[in-house]
Amino acid sequence: MNDTAPRDRDTTETSLIQAVEAVILDEGFAGVGINALARRAGVDKVLIYRYFGGLSGLLTAYAEAGDFWWRVDDLLAEPLPDPDSSDALAQTLARVFERHVAFLRRHPVTLEVIAWEMSARNELTAALESVREQRSLAVMRCLAERFGVAESEFLAQVAPLLTLLGAAANYLAARGRHLSVFNGLDLQSEAGWTQLCRTAEHMLAAVQLPHPSADSISPATNLDQDP
């Protein structure tokens, strides 16, 4: 135990949240436990109960505050296509997909989670799943508002398309950690992922997407209120 570790609550909470990611990277999900996390953070394990209510609370805090998943305002940051142009929605969805792919490729812990949750469900995968779903829905609400499309229509017509593309990116990025080629595509090269993103762009351009109408504009969504 590191007796010199700061006892300031904010610092300790941050250390414990960072410990979750460090343990996942070094030991895998099987190593995530109260004792291991306290040891990695250099604090007494009683502080996990005091500050987070236990392991579940710490894992939830990591899911919400950690760098596990992109944030809405990052995914929708300007510049984006002018919403008044005829193909703006398709182009915007293509940019969002590119940013999603770029995030995945920069975050090995996220890829570990994606691979792990395919075969197991526990407190950590449940907490991370909740954050991911909240942010994905927030992105779609923001896009519906940006393009003046009713949220219900956007969710019915666009969400399934984004789900297919997003799931493909998740799977291929996770597989690309250990598998270099999939159906002849190099998953460990910039060229391979650029080809995938261009293909997604062509697909989006070919799909009939909803058009805005004056009576279908959704209430404003505040990007600052990122889940």
Image: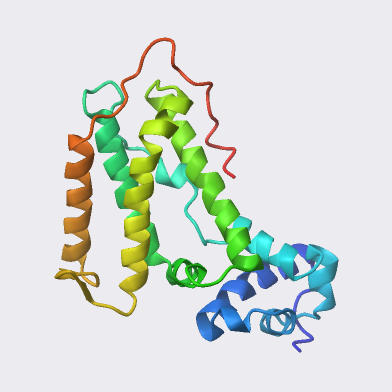
- The percent position of residue 218, horizontal first and vertical second, equals 49, 21
Comparing 99 with 201, the one in front is: 201
Q: In this view, does 113 lie above or below 101?
A: below
Q: At x 21% / y 23%, what residue is drawn?
A: 86
Q: In which quarter of the image is residue 5?
A: bottom right
Q: At x 18% / y 71%, what residue is drawn?
A: 186
Comparing 60 with 129, the one in front is: 129
What is the number of callouts on the image? 0
The C terminus lies in which quarter of the figure?
Answer: top right
- The percent position of residue 119, horizontal first and vertical second, equals 50, 72
- The percent position of residue 159, horizontal first and vertical second, equals 40, 39
Q: Residue furthest top?
A: 214
- The percent position of residue 35, horizontal first and vertical second, equals 74, 84
Q: In this view, does 202 lie above or below 88?
A: below
Colour scheme used in the picture? rainbow
The N terminus lies in which quarter of the figure?
Answer: bottom right
Specify whether 17 is left or right of 99: right
Q: Residue furthest bottom?
A: 1
Q: In this view, does 77 lie above or below 121?
A: above
Specify whether 40 is left or right of 52: left
Q: Is residue 102 visible?
A: no
Q: Quadrant of residue 145?
A: top left
Q: In which quarter of the image is residue 202?
A: top left
Q: At x 42% / y 28%, what residue is drawn?
A: 144
Specify whether 211 is left or right of 124: left
Q: At x 55% / y 71%, what residue is drawn?
A: 120
Q: Can residue 186 be seen in this view?
A: yes
